[in-house]
Image (tube, grey):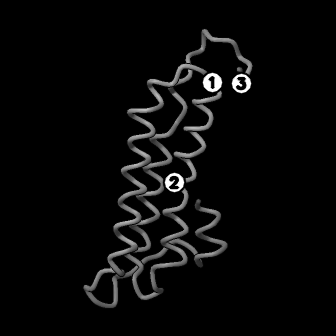
């Protein structure tokens, strides 16, 4: 995500927004839904996963939803809103961090995924 931010977004955003208006409401609604979906996947669905294949699918879906927030900040938020861009980046990083695969126990077979 940081590489995307530097390569596509021109580096870490800094400064203040040009005015106090928020980005379009649709962007905020969709991003909020993605954060909620990531939280639901991680804390409700993954703990109930019974095989590694299902866990892998859920894990990848959660990571994809988390990373999309970075792209929203890069491409959908105008350049005059660095605080908003940074909020999207930080939210994305926090969502990715909570997806760390601690749900895999070490005592199980090391092959991933299994049927």
**Residue 40: where, in percent of width, then height?**
39, 41
Q: Which residue is mark 2?
A: 65
Which residue is depicted at the point 57% across and 52% down? Answer: 64
**Marks 3 and 1, how far apart in space?**
7 Å
Q: Earlier in the sequence, mark 3 or mark 2?
A: 2
Total number of numbered discs in the rendering: 3
In the figure, 90 relative to 11: above or below? above
Q: Nearer the viewer, residue 54 or 10?
A: 54
Quarter of the C terminus within the rendering: top right
**Residue 90: where, in percent of width, then height?**
43, 59
Q: Quadrant of residue 51?
A: top right
Q: Earlier in the sequence, mark 2 or mark 1?
A: 1
**Marks 3 and 2, how far apart in space?**
22 Å
Q: Nearer the viewer, residue 101 or 2?
A: 101
Q: Which residue is mark 1?
A: 52
Q: Earlier in the sequence, mark 3 or mark 1?
A: 1
Q: Confirm or deny contact between disc 3 and disc 1 (CB under 8 A).
A: yes
Which residue is depicted at the point 47% across and 63% down? Answer: 89
Label 1 element class: helix
Mark 3, residues whose alpha carbon is within 10 Å: few (<14), some, or many (≥20)?
few
In the figure, 46 relative to 85: above or below? above
Mark 2, residues whose alpha carbon is within 10 Å: few (<14), some, or many (≥20)?
many
Which labelled disc corresponds to residue 112?
A: 3
**Marks 2 and 1, how far apart in space?**
20 Å
């Amino acid at each position: 995500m940081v590489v995307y931010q530097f390569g596509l977004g021109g580096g870490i955003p800094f400064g203040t927004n040009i005015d106090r208006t928020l980005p379009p409401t649709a962007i905020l609604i969709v991003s909020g839904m993605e954060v909620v979906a990531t939280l639901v996947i991680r804390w409700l669905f993954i703990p109930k996963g019974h095989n590694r294949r299902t866990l892998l699918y859920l894990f990848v879906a959660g990571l994809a939803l988390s990373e999309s927030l970075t792209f929203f900040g890069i491409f959908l938020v105008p350049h005059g809103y660095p605080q908003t861009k940074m909020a999207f980046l930080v939210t994305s990083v926090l969502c990715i961090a909570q997806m760390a695969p601690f749900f895999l126990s070490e005592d199980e077979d090391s092959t991933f995924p299994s049927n």
